[in-house]
Image: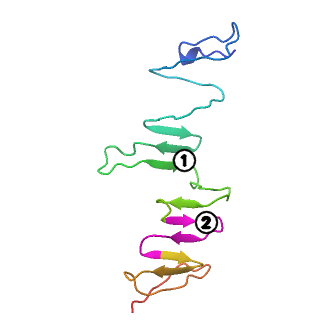
Amino acid sequence: MRNLDHCGPRWSLEKPPLTRLNLPRFGVSGQFAVLGRSTLADVGVTGKLFMGLLTIDGLGEVESASPAAAINTLSGPLKLRSNGLGGLEILRGRIVIDPHNNLTVVQGDLSVDQGRIFANESIRGGVTIRAGQTQIRVEEH
């Protein structure tokens, strides 16, 4: 058994094998360490969650005028759906990227389909974006 003295008081599982521990309410004030695999369900985290290079800040900048939660990576780009399976929906499906890299803006002033941008009556003009193109200009009519 590993020495867990640095984690504070511990239970010993060396004596008769303990197969199940039933604690309807269990609280820890201070530090709590689990060294090994864990399965958790319905977990609430107040503050920041650190997972390797990923951080999730559920409280955001509380001192800010408009606090907001944040998801960040500590190295490189934040990759969403990097395995290429399935699509990505944002804002209840208002912005959708399907597995074939088609972008759809469902609600709002713009929609994009096969490299063409379409606009409703609040925006005038139109243009086709070609591969490799870095700038576009939409002329007013």
Q: Which residue is mark 1?
A: 74
The image quadrant of residue 22 is top right
| Relative to 85, 121 lies left or right | left
User: Which type of secondary structure does the marked residue at label 2 adopt?
Assistant: loop
Figure quadrant of residue 132: bottom right
Q: Is residue 17 above or below residue 38?
A: above
Disc 1 vs disc 2: Cβ atoms closer than 8 Å? no
Find out whether residue 23 is within the magenta segment.
no
At 50% across and 65% down in the image, what residue appears? 95
What's the magenta region?
95-110
Distance Cα–Cα, label 1 vs label 2: 27 Å
The image shows residue 43 at horizontal and vertical percentages of 51, 34
Give the label on residue 98, or none.
Answer: 2
Reading the chain from its start, which is encountered first: label 1 or label 2? 1
Q: Quadrant of residue 99?
A: bottom right
Can you tell which of label 1 and label 2 is closer to the viewer? 2
Q: Quadrant of the C terminus?
A: bottom left
Amino acid residing under circle 2 = Asp
Q: Residues within 10 Å of mark 2 (few under 14, many from 20)?
A: some
Residue at 49% from the left image edge and 44% from the top image edge = 56
Q: Amino acid at mark 1?
A: Leu
Q: Nearer the viewer, residue 6 or 24?
A: 24
Tell me which residue sits at (48%, 65%) in the image. Answer: 94
Q: Residue at x 58, y 53 (%)?
A: 76
Residue 89 in the image, given as x and y percentages of width and height: 54, 60
Q: Going by the picture, which residue comes out furthest to the left? A: 65
Residue 38: % across, % down? 62, 29
Q: Position of residue 92 (x, y in %)?
A: 48, 59
